[in-house]
Amino acid sequence: MAKVYETEVAIIGGGIAGISTALELLNKGISCLILDRDIPARFGGLARDAFGGMALCGTPLQKLNKIKDSPELLLSDWHAFADFSEDDVWPKKWAEMYAQRNNADVYQWLQSQGVKFFPAVNWVERGDFAPGNSVPRYHIVWGTGWELTEVLIARLNDHQHSDKLETKFEHFVEDFVVENGEVKGCHGVDESSGEAFEVKANTVVVATGGINGNLDKVRQNWPEDWPAPPETILNGSHQYSDGHIHDQVASQGGNITHLDWQWNYAAGIKHPKPRVPNHGLSLIPPKSALWMDCRGNRIGPRPMVTGFDTNKLCERVCEQEKGYTWQILNKKIARKEISISGSEHNPSIKNKQLIKFLKEILLGNDELYEYLTTECEDVVVAHSLAELVEKMNALTGESLVSLENLQRDIGNYDQQIDRGATFHDDEQLRLIEHARRWKGDKVRTCKYQKILDESAFPLVAIREFLVSRKSMGGIQTDLCSRVLDTEGNPMENLYAVGEAAGFGGGGVCGKRSLEGTFLSLCVLSGRVAGRHLAGESMP
């Protein structure tokens, strides 16, 4: 006999979107059951590992930093980056709603829950050939995504109606319970005991994340206009974001859209202590490093530089002969510029150690440098270019990297720097100069640092792979987070939120994200679903 649970609303998935939904339901005393496949220590999903950045506009922090922004400007930038088609009606509606409501319904709401943001606002995804963020919008949760999850989970536990909430971990939902063509719950297996369970519910909310934890699905839904996926793709997503419930929604007639809209990263290295197969870390690559191909040629003619168009960087990695790249730098650049995305490798921010964080910014991050150069197999260190080439080739097992190629291209770059800024004719140097105009980038970017500067040695080479991260397409929803069928009609009793819904509408971000739109849209879409189920609209 299967265990049977009864509730008003069943929420499949315990990430930020599911938690935000539950908070709104509890506010109205509506009973809900969160079913999460992970263990209790991982409650909060991928957000627990996230850096915690959010794209927000019109906030007091922007005003503090003298940034002039508006919902209209955000929406204009959004459309420029998204590359929507005429058929993307719901994604466009969600984008407009986000532009208008992110300040009040995400930023201010999170602050009311006890979430704090670091005062500086970062400028990311500025755009390359298409306009991106016209101004800095990237707000960082003080404490990273780990703090965000801890605060919201505490709000669940301390809620005046917490007796209305049940949370079941290690519960794998296999399919929906359907009666007379309507979803009336779900069923699956308690993986801790092997016992079957069934949930009877008036409404089911899908909050299971996307497909990018399943590398087979990532490859199956690869963008058609891109080169073939590389042989090695690292997994930077949640292991249970496998698209299983997407398939069950589709089997009930739900509309799944734009699974080829994926948000991956170009600078991944293998995790030295992997928790899942092909576990990858996503570097925030240094702007002052040179990006090279597998043979030691500088990738061009337009150099690869981070911070302008992440999606384009990923596409260019796929164009490479071996499907991976090298970044060449030195210790001085690495200590000042390199970082790893996520809470795990940003302890000073995660633990809210302000003085330590400022020291790392101003003096360099020695702990991270030591970690990368001593524990990560994709990072090699040498005291001469010849030694570096030898170690690079030893790492791959192929004698592909040419010392002559590296000497030529690094030498040309360093000579540009020697001539002085007045005579710089290298696009990477121009982009560095542009980035350094913003104070947030200036303190973290070297001022025209040569690679073969012996005072900055040793040399460092990093082999980098594509990292699978997030699904920007998914289950199509209306502005109430109700799942739509293939005819565009709302399905009875079925909602989808967060990454499962392509963060809203089945693809609100479009083909490219302005970055920082994911956590905030999980909050917004979850709140929208909860408020609608409670019989209220968002203010």
Image: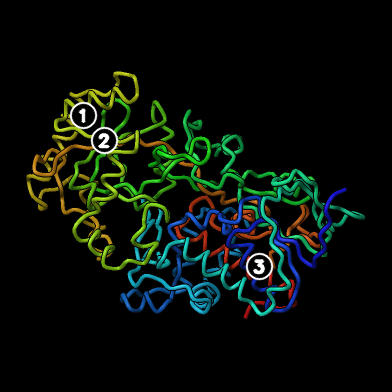
- The extreme front residue here reads 193
User: Which numbered marker is on residue 461?
Assistant: 2
> Which residue occupies the extreme right position in the image?
180
Where does the image place residue 90, in percent across and percent down from the top left? 65, 60
Q: Nearer the viewer, residue 483 or 300?
A: 483
Q: Residue at coordinates 66% horizontally, 74% vertically from top-left?
A: 24
Residue located at (8% from left, 50% from top): 420
- The disc, 3 or 1, on the residue closer to the chain's N-terminal end is 3
Return the mark for residue 21: 3
- Indicate the position of residue 77 as horizontal and vertical percent values: 44, 62
Disc 2 crowd rating (10 Å Cα; few below 14, some 14-19, many 20+) is: many
Q: Is residue 399 left or right of residue 218?
A: left
Q: Say which residue appears at 23% left-offset and 37% top-offset.
A: 460
Q: Nearer the viewer, residue 418 or 394?
A: 394
Dot 2 amino acid type? Ala
**CB of mark 3 within 8 Å of CB of mark 1?**
no
**Label 1: few (<14), some or many (≥20) within 10 Å?**
many
The picture quadrant where one finds residue 521 is bottom right
- Element on which disc 3 rests: helix
In the image, 323: left or right of 46?
A: left
State which tag comes first along the sequence, 2 or 1.
Answer: 1
Question: Residues at badges 2 and 1 in contact (C-beta under 8 Å)?
Answer: yes
Three-letter amino acid code at disc 1? Leu
The colour scheme is rainbow
Q: Which x, y percent locates residue 157?
A: 62, 71
Residue at label 1? 388
**Residue type, label 3:** Thr
What x and y, as percent, mark residue 186? 80, 53
Q: Which callout, 2 or 3, points at the residue further toward the start of the chain? A: 3
- Which mark is on residue 519? none
Could you tell me which residue is drawn at 33 percent across and 19 percent down? 398
Quarter in which the C terminus is drawn: bottom right
